[in-house]
Image (cartoon, rainbow, N blue to C red):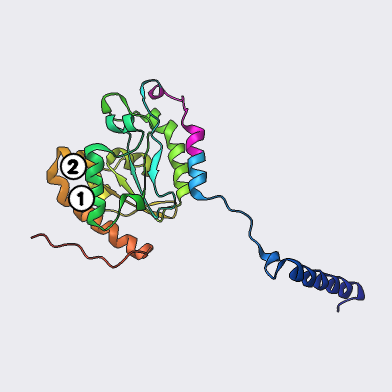
Amino acid sequence: MHTPEFERIVEAAERYVRQQDALVGGDWYVRQPDIPDAADDLAAYGRSICGCRKCALSETRRHFVFGTGNPNGKLMLIGEAPGEEEDLKGEPFVGKAGHLLDRILAAIAFERGEVYIANVLKCRPPRNRDPLPEEMAMCLPYLKRQIALVQPKLILLLGRVAAHAVLRTAQSLTQMRNLTHQYGSIPVLVTFHPAALLRNPQWKQETWEDVQKLRRLYDERVGDKAPWTPKKKS
């Protein structure tokens, strides 16, 4: 049963609401707090770590290569480390490997600006050697934070090194390509690194099969793109 005191509180609250409606409009009490834009958060995080000196790669880099693309991208692509051209420009996947990646994305009706692209390592290993385990261990928390900020619905790992780092597995690339993995709740697929395709063009057909699977999974999980069917080869 409502007490007289309870009724007085309700009446006072109703009076206050009517007064505020008259003064500032009917939606004053449901105004949402300002929510930081994902792009601002990601850019701020990049600025906060770009001076990293945790390993020796910081001594030989020209640029700290953070990431590029849509900070709200539903699809995130992850490679292993910057190469020479990426180190010069400060952006992942430029040069010949980057152009090939653009064509791969275009083949499944994606533009580079729709997705977010990053590497496990943010600095170029000398002579493009494979990243050392300790280098990956120190850089991986940066990548994990990027994933948490972007919140992609699907991840594509480019190459064996990136896949081993993110998935914590020692499986072969063939084994990894044949499975759909999970990073938390995010489905993860694996394919060849574009730089490897430039050296081994015979792998392009397998990559085409991988990215068709990627596009089908994207349509199932996200479904925000126009219907797509793969073009038949002439």
Element marked by disc 1: helix
Q: Which residue is mark 2?
A: 197
Mark seen at residue 207: 1
- Marks 2/1: CA distance? 9 Å
Asked if the residues shown at circle 2 and circle 1 are in contact, with their CB atoms under 8 angstroms apart, the answer is yes
Q: Is residue 137 visible?
A: yes
Q: Position of residue 12 (x, y in %)?
A: 85, 71
Residue bounds of the magenta highlight: 45-58
Q: Residue at x 33, y 34 (%)?
A: 81
Q: Position of residue 191 (x, y in %)?
A: 25, 47
Decide whether residue 95 is among the magenta residues: no
Q: Is residue 192 visible?
A: no
Element marked by disc 2: helix
Decide whether residue 52 is among the magenta residues: yes
Q: Specify the amino acid type for callout 2.
A: Leu
Residue located farthest toward the right when viewing the structure as drawn: 4
Q: Residue at x 25, y 57 (%)?
A: 108
Residue located farthest toward the front when viewing the structure as drawn: 23
